[in-house]
Amino acid sequence: MIPAVEWARELAGALVDAARKAGADAGDAAVSLGSALSASAREGTIEELTRSSWRAAGLRVIVGGRLGFVSSADAPLDARSIRALAESALSLARVATPSDDNVLPPAVPDAGAAAREAALCTWDDATAEAGPDWATAHALAMDAALRRVPGVAGTKDVSATTRRGVLALATSSGFVGAQRGTAASLSCTAIAEDGGRKQSERDWDAARALAALRPPEELARVAALRTLARVGARALPPTRAPVIVEPSVARGFLAALLSAASGAAVARRRSWLCELLGEAVLPPGVSVIDDANIVGGLASRAYDGEGVLTPRTVIVDEAGVLRTLLTDAHSAHRLGVPLTGHAARSATTLPAPGSTNTLVTGGSGTLDDLIASTRRGLLVTSLLGHGPDAVTGDYSRGAAGFWIEDGAIAFPVDGLSIAGRMIDMLRGIDRVAADAESRAALRAPSLRFAELAIGGRESAPDSR
């Protein structure tokens, strides 16, 4: 065990011990430390090269049903500072409003947590040790490859990043654990001139290990081709038609579903899924599964932010029915539903329900197959604006992509919007591909909505 992990575990345990000695009925502490390195390139030069580091701690205490929480961006390093942080948390708890829902889960010591964490392969030595040479070389390689493509007029947001960290957790019920993680990412955007305006598209990749990233030249090639395909984009008049979304866009729709399935959101009546537990939210045959135990997954973990094991959880079953909410101890107790082990936290925030690796199953074929099966419709490759209204699920966002005629891409389009109600949109999915990407924790495939309202310009020529 590396010294940083041991230090974080010991500090988390010391904070809980200090809280109990100061009078807390229960409590837990999280300690994080780590660093991030990022290089960005533009026009053949390194525009920025930054390194950041952190060493933070947070302590939650419960006294007579009253909750107090304090955090520090500079974790305490001696016994006096540890006592001071604990006393601060207790002083806040004593003036808080009591609630029966301020509870901690009945976590117990888990001797196998360290072995499970190691088996998940969330740590890669090469990524942890990567320095400025790796980041600058990859950023410059993407920038140069983009600028070599005929028709590319410029680049932006070309970056290479690595991150490493440790998050330790201790609870008053006896759990103590620490999880390590690394991640690396590459991203680049090409710019093309288009009759006095500019078109741009990006490509990116992310993984736990450097060796799993696609080559920078490949990302640049894809970003350039996507950008050049946008040249000549035109507007459309308002219409209704099938709408296909590629995986990067589909991810946003499914992220909205996961956010609405948060037990905390439902408990606060801030979710458009409030009355839909046990009801169909997706078409039959499509399921949504949360699995924290995927080897190398970007959100894999041995236990959640409260020391609870996170099992494989079926959120939406094969009948398309919403089977469970994602809960932490507070939301599960408030709603009277099972604790699912989905508390997410950092050292400076309270736990709240959150998903881990999320998979959409039940699809077949590829994005090209969805296009080929669509006589006339819209392929969306990018969206503008925010997601749906959290309470009503009303959805309206700007969109750009390609118009489809007779099962083939006809021409690029922009200046559009798509609108509807989230529950109607999700229930109206009629095709799901099997092309989910592993470069994100939410592994979404291409989707086709049977018909959506597409906003455009009244003066635009009809695509027919």
Image: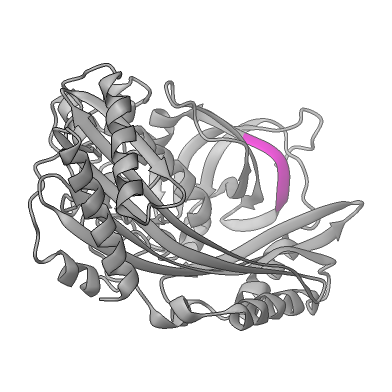
Q: Along the horizontal axis of the image, is 302 left or right of 345?
A: left
Q: Nearer the viewer, residue 239 or 316?
A: 316
Q: Along the horizontal axis of the image, is 345 left or right of 425?
A: left
Seen at 19% across and 24% down, the residue is: 101
Above or below — where is 264 with respect to 351? above
Above or below — where is 103 with respect to 410? above
Spot the residue most to the right: 196
Note whether residue 35 is visible. Answer: yes
- Residue stretch in magenta: 412-417
> Which of the 4 quarters of the picture holds residue 353?
top left
Seen at 68% across and 30% down, the residue is: 238
Above or below — where is 351 with respect to 174? above
The quarter of the image holding the N terminus is bottom left
Q: At which x and y percent is residue 162? A: 52, 70
Note whether residue 355 is visible. Answer: no
The quarter of the image holding the C terminus is top right
Above or below — where is 105 with respect to 140? above
Q: Along the horizontal axis of the image, is 135 left or right of 329?
A: right
Q: At which x and y percent is residue 265? A: 34, 28
| Residue 414 counted in the magenta span | yes
| Residue 447 counted in the magenta span | no
Q: At which x and y percent is residue 295? A: 27, 70
